[in-house]
C-alpha cells in the first residue's frame, strides 16, 4: 500500500449487525443478505464468508457476475439475482443454480425451455410492482401474469416479492403497499396458488414495518451498520472505516487561496494539510468546503474543493500534525465520529451512494474487533 488510503472492514461488527437483525426478525423469518455491488463496497467475498459463518444461506446480488463469484468461492446455498436479466443469458441460471427475478413472460418462456432441455426445474421469484414503478407488472395485472407463469412446468414459483420506494418517509403509502401485497397473496391463495416465500422488506421495511416481514426479509444497508433513518431502533455498529495519511503540510499566508476555483481563502496564517483522498476514490466532490476529518482525535474542516486525488484541510494554528499522520475520513476516534450518514448528508446524497462508490482500488483490510462502546451484555434492541 504505497498510496496511503485504505478501508478497514470490521467483520465482528458485521457479525453483530447480522445477529441483531436475526434477533429482531425472529428465527422463523428467512434472511436474504443483500451483498450487491461488492457488499455495498465492503468486499463481496470476505463479507459473504463472514455471514456464511453466521448461518446465512441466502444471498441477494445485482448481477450474474457477483453470483458466479459466490459460487466460485464454494457457496452452495441460495442466490437470488435482484434484477431483470436479459433473456439471452438464461443459461447462467441453470449452469450456476441461481434464482432469477422474473418480471416478464419472454424471459420465463426462454428459461422454461432451457430448463426443460436440461430436465431441470428452476426456482424463481416473481416481482410485482406495488408502487416502486420499476420492475414487474403492476399488482392489478399480476394475477393473470402469475397464472400464465403457472403454465411453465419447468419453473418452480417459489417466491413472490415487491419493493418499497418510501419506507423511510411515507408510512401511509408503505402501509398501502403492504396491504396491496397482502391482498394479492390472499387472492392467489383463493385460486390455490401459494408461494413458499413472500417478501418485501429492505432495511427500512425491516425496522419500521414488522407487518412487512412476512416470512422473508432482504436487509442490505443495516448489515453494514449504516442507518437508513435517524430514529433507528436497532443498535448497529459501522463496519467500514476509511483512513488516509497526510502527505504534505504547509503554512499558508492570510488571504492566500486553497485549491481549484480558489473557493477557500485562508483567514489567518496557518497550516494546511494535504491528504491522499479525492473524488476519484469515491470521496464526493460535493464535500468541497463541507466535510470534516479527524486527525489525532481532533476535527478539521476540508478547505477548498475536493480534487481528483487530494483534499486539503485547514489545520489553523495546529502545529502537531505532520506528514505521514493518520487521518480518519469515515470512522471514530476517542471523542469524535464521522459516519457514512454524515458524509451523505453533507454531500446531499444517500449513504448507499457513498459506500457503493468507494473505489475498488482502495485496499480493504479485514479486521475483527469488538466495538469498545458496546458493553458486554448490552441489549441489542432498545
Ligand atoms: C438493494 C435491495 C435491497 C436492500 O435494500 P437496503 O435498503 O439496503 O436494505 C432489498 N431488496 C431489493 C430488491 C434491493 O434491490
Image (spheres, rainbow, N blue to C red):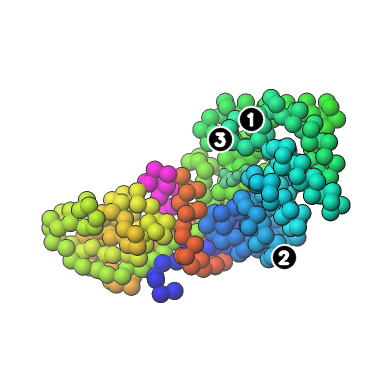
Q: Residue at x 70, y 62 (%)?
A: 71
Is residue 83 visible to the viewer in this orientation of the structure? Answer: yes
Reply above or below: 217 against 72.
above
Range drawn in magenta: 337-349
Find disc 2 in the rendering and name its residue.
74
Q: Position of residue 39 (x, y in %)?
A: 58, 56
User: Is the N terminus in the top left, top right, bottom left or bottom right quadrant?
Assistant: bottom left
Identify the residue at the far bottom of this view. Answer: 2
**Residue 375 appears in view:** no
On residue 165, the disc is: 3
Q: Are marks 2 and 1 in contact (CB under 8 Å)?
A: no
Q: Circle 3 sits in a helix, a strand or a loop, which is it?
A: loop
Please state the horizontal and vertical placement of residue 107, each as a whole percent of the image.
Answer: 71, 42
Q: CA distance from mark 2 to mark 1?
A: 36 Å
- The residue wearing badge 1 is 130
Q: Earlier in the sequence, mark 2 or mark 3?
A: 2
Examine the image and state in which quarter residue 6 appears. bottom left
Q: What residue do we see at 37% from left, 46% from top?
A: 346
State which tag comes first along the sequence, 2 or 1.
2
Earlier along the polypeptide chain: callout 3 or callout 1? 1
- Image location of residue 169, percent across then percent down: 51, 33
The residue positioned 37% from the left and 56% from the top of the image is 279
- SS at circle 1: loop
The answer for how far apart the CA atoms under marks 3 and 1 are is 10 Å
Residue 269's spot in the image, x, y percent?
Answer: 14, 60
Q: Look at the numbered discs 3 and 1 and tell me whether their residues touch, using CB distance below 8 Å.
A: no
Is residue 210 within the magenta segment?
no
Question: Ligand 1 within 8 A of label 2's CB?
Answer: no
Q: Secondary structure at mark 2?
A: loop
Mark 1 lies within 8 Å of ligand 1 (Cβ measured): no
Amino acid at each position: 500500500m504505497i498510496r496511503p488510503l485504505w478501508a478497514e472492514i470490521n467483520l465482528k461488527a458485521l457479525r453483530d449487525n447480522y445477529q441483531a437483525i436475526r434477533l429482531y426478525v425472529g428465527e422463523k423469518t428467512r434472511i436474504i443478505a443483500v451483498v450487491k455491488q461488492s457488499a455495498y463496497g465492503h468486499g463481496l467475498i470476505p463479507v459473504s464468508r463472514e455471514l456464511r459463518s453466521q448461518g446465512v444461506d441466502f444471498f441477494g446480488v445485482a448481477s450474474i457476475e457477483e453470483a458466479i463469484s459466490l459460487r466460485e468461492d464454494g457457496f452452495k446455498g441460495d442466490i437470488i439475482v435482484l434484477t431483470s436479466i436479459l433473456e439471452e443469458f438464461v443459461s447462467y441460471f441453470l449452469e450456476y443454480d441461481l434464482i432469477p427475478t422474473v418480471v416478464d413472460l419472454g424471459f420465463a418462456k426462454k428459461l422454461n425451455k432451457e430448463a426443460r432441455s436440461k430436465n431441470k426445474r428452476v426456482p424463481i421469484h416473481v416481482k410485482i410492482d406495488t408502487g416502486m414503478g420499476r420492475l414487474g407488472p403492476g399488482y392489478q395485472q399480476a394475477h393473470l401474469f402469475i397464472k400464465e407463469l403457472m403454465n411453465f412446468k419447468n419453473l418452480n414459483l417459489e417466491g413472490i416479492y415487491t419493493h418499497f420506494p418510501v419506507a423511510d418517509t411515507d408510512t401511509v403509502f408503505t402501509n398501502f403497499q403492504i396491504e396491496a401485497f397482502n391482498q394479492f397473496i390472499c387472492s392467489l391463495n383463493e385460486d390455490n396458488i401459494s408461494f413458499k416465500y413472500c417478501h418485501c422488506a429492505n432495511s427500512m421495511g425491516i425496522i419500521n414495518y414488522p407487518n412487512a416481514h412476512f416470512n422473508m426479509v432482504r436487509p442490505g444497508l443495516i448489515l453494514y451498520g449504516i442507518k437508513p433513518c435517524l430514529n433507528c431502533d436497532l443498535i448497529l455498529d459501522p463496519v467500514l472505516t476509511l483512513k488516509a495519511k497526510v502527505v504534505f503540510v504547509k503554512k499558508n499566508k492570510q488571504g492566500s487561496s486553497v485549491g481549484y476555483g480558489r473557493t477557500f481563502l485562508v483567514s489567518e496564517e496557518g497550516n494546511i494539510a494535504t491528504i491522499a483522498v479525492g473524488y476519484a476514490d469515491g470521496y464526493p466532490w460535493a464535500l468541497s468546503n463541507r466535510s470534516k476529518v479527524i486527525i489525532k482525535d481532533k476535527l478539521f474542516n476540508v478547505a477548498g474543493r475536493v480534487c481528483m486525488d487530494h483534499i486539503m484541510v485547514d489545520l489553523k494554528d495546529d502545529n502537531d500534525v505532520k506528514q505521514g499522520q493518520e487521518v480518519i475520513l469515515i470512522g471514530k476516534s476517542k471523542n469524535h465520529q464521522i459516519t457514512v450518514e454524515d458524509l451523505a448528508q453533507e454531500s446531499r446524497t444517500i449513504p448507499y451512494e457513498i459506500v457503493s462508490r468507494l473505489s475498488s482500488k482502495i485496499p480493504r483490510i479485514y479486521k475483527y474487533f469488538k466495538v469498545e462502546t458496546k458493553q458486554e451484555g448490552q441489549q441489542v434492541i432498545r
